[in-house]
Image: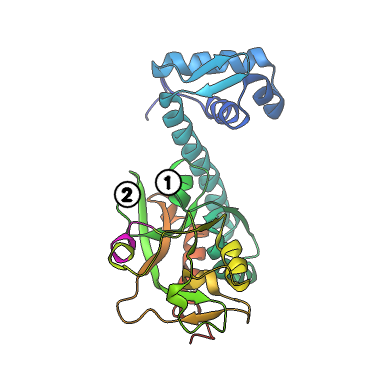
């Protein structure tokens, strides 16, 4: 049988690393874990000695993970989550129970508002033992997939197909293609001549070539915080916007939606998880409900002009 060695980190040491990173200091981590600050400091020093790298920069304002520490903390989160899954799934298999336990979901705003609610309703009905926890993350930079890579989420609803490679250890699968449309207030005979209202998450690398080829699209004169603010500004007559279909679910009657034609841009919406968690019962249960919801998620919203 394999034996642990002095260089192995124990689960309690992993929890200390995660707590120190999440709280930003050893004293606050100690309060969170019910330990003394000296015990936390001793544990971190022991982990650093075993790994052979400095994991935290200490300072008067707290402790911040070094690049090595960020890697260690991300792996610690994954390992601790797999230990939780091991216990939950083994217990469920022994009792022949359905899927149960926490399920951490990261999603960008429009997916959290318009795709997830009916999915989670069906998930709870079929698997009342599952406890979904949704975190809304801006789909810029590392986006929702970064939450999974960092061990903060089990599965992410993400936009796929961009130029940035998927972080190592993650797997992705598409759910549907989401079309973009032109959105404007009613009463304009030439909506393409209006000022552009936009937000940071809107133009990903998968649509950049299309945007660059459209000489009628001006530089954004108004930049909003999110797609909900964009809709409010467009509805108020402050300009036009080019928006994906999910952002227009439940759009008010005070806007008009115009098709951009057969060459309109699209983005692929899918999910990202780890290769280990992809086999867990909680993640597989959510994926089944997501795939069942795809017919409602595809296509343009009603009211398209």
What separation in Å lies between label 2 and label 1 (alpha carbons)? 9 Å
User: In the drawing, what numbered circle is on residue 142?
Assistant: 1
Q: Element type at marker 1?
A: loop
- Toward which corner of the image does residue 174 lie, by quadrant? bottom left
Q: Element type at marker 2?
A: loop
Q: Nearer the viewer, residue 36 or 134?
A: 134
Question: On the image, numbered disc 2 is attached to which residue?
Answer: 164
Q: Which residues are magenta?
A: 204-210
Residue 42 in percent (x, y) is at 57, 13
* Disc 2 to disc 1: CB gap under 8 Å: yes
Residue 41 in percent (x, y) is at 59, 14
Say whether disc 2 or disc 1 marks the residue closer to the N-terminus. 1
Q: Nearer the viewer, residue 41 or 111?
A: 111
Residue shown at the point (53%, 18%) measured from the top left: 44
Q: Nearer the viewer, residue 31 or 192?
A: 192
Residue shown at the point (45%, 60%) measured from the top left: 202
Graded by Cα atoms within 10 Å as few (under 14), some (14 to 19) or many (20 or more), the crowding at tag 2 reads few
Residue shown at the point (55%, 15%) measured from the top left: 58
Let me know if residue 108 appears in the view. Answer: yes
Residue 77 vs residue 27: left or right? left
């Amino acid at each position: 049988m394999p034996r642990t060695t002095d260089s192995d980190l124990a689960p309690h040491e992993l929890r200390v690393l995660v707590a120190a990173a999440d709280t930003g200091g050893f004293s606050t981590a100690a309060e969170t874990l019910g330990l003394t600050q000296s015990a936390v400091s001793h544990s971190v020093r022991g982990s650093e000695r075993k790994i052979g790298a400095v994991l935290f920069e200490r300072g008067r304002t707290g402790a911040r993970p070094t690049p090595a520490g960020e890697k260690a903390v991300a792996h610690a989160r994954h390992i601790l989550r797999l230990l939780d899954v091991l216990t939950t799934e083994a217990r469920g298999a022994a009792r022949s129970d359905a899927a149960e336990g926490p399920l951490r979901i990261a999603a960008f705003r429009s997916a959290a508002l318009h795709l997830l609610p009916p999915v989670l309703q069906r998930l709870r009905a079929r698997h009342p033992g599952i406890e979904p926890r949704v975190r809304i993350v801006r789909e810029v930079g590392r986006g929702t997939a970064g939450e999974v890579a960092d061990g903060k989420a089990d599965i992410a609803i993400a936009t796929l197909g961009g130029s940035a490679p998927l972080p190592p250890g993650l797997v992705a699968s598409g759910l549907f293609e989401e079309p973009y449309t032109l959105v404007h207030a009613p009463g304009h005979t030439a909506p393409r001549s209006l000022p552009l209202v936009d937000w940071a998450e809107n133009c990903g690398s998968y649509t950049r070539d299309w945007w660059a080829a459209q000489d009628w699209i001006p530089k954004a004169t108004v930049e909003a915080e999110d797609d909900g603010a964009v809709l409010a500004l467009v509805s108020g007559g402050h300009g036009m916007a080019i928006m994906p279909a999910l952002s227009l679910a439940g759009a008010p009657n005070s806007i008009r939606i115009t098709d951009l034609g057969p060459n309109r841009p699209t983005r692929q919406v899918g999910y990202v998880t780890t290769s280990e968690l992809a086999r867990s019962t909680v993640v597989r249960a959510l994926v089944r409900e997501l795939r069942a919801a795809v017919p409602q998620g595809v296509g343009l919203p009603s009211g398209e002009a």
